[in-house]
């Protein structure tokens, strides 16, 4: 009678069992998934489109547009923002991936499950910028 391994429930056929490729294939699929999910893996970054619409925060509108940001940065060091939609998995870690020599892009916050708000200073260049990557959680 077949038994299973402790951690991944891999099937261990008994010596008297006939070889069954579906059992082997199922075991290989479980091993493949476990290795893939255990390995730190960066997924492709997502971009701030060249056509992104940037909204400017000012002393007059920050309270209505983004009151939480006003508390974090009352000087409005990064007064421009745009929202970026992304498709990382729920348990992935989102990391900034600022390219070399790109100035003007500042902090970000998670707005919803699939949207980030990116802040920029007056040097935002509006060109396509791969700004983030997802690291498998």
Image (spheres, rainbow, N blue to C red):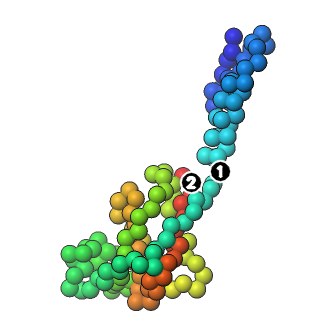
Report which quarter residue 53 is drawn in: bottom left
Extreme bottom residue here?
A: 122
Circle nearer the N terminus (1, 2): 1
Residue at image position (45%, 79%) is 50
- Which element carries disc 2, helix, strand or loop? loop
On the image, the x and y values in percent for residue 104 come to 46, 85
For residue 122, side relative to residue 69 (left or right): right
Asked if residue 133 can be seen in this view, the reply is yes
Residue 21 on image: x %, y %: 72, 24
Name the quadrant containing residue 126. Answer: bottom left
What is the quadrant of the N terminus in the image? top right
Q: 55 and 60: which one is in front?
A: 55
Dot 1 falls on a residue whose secondary structure is loop
- Residue 117 left/right relative to 18: left
- In the picture of the structure, the residue carrying the numbered disc 1 is 39
Residue lying farthest right?
15
Q: Which mark is residue 136?
A: 2
Quick check: 43 left or right of 70? Answer: right
x, y (%) of residue 19? 76, 18
Q: Looking at the image, do the residues carrying marks 1 and 2 touch, with CB atoms under 8 Å apart? A: yes
Could you classify mark 1 by the number of other residues whose Cα lies within 10 Å: few (under 14), some (14-19), or many (20 or more)?
few
Q: Residue at x 69, y 30 (%)?
A: 25
């Amino acid at each position: 009678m077949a038994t299973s391994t402790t951690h991944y429930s891999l099937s261990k056929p008994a010596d008297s069992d006939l070889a069954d490729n579906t059992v082997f294939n199922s075991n290989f699929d479980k091993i493949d998934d476990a290795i893939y999910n255990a390995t730190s893996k960066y997924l492709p970054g997502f971009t701030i489109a060249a056509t992104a619409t940037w909204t400017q925060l000012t002393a007059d509108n920050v309270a209505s547009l983004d009151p939480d940001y006003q508390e974090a940065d009352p000087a409005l060091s990064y007064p421009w923002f745009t929202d970026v939609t992304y498709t990382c998995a729920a348990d992935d870690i989102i990391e900034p991936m600022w390219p070399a020599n790109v100035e003007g892009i500042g902090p970000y916050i998670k707005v919803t499950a699939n949207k980030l708000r990116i802040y920029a200073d007056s040097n935002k260049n509006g060109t396509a910028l791969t700004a983030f990557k997802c690291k498998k959680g």
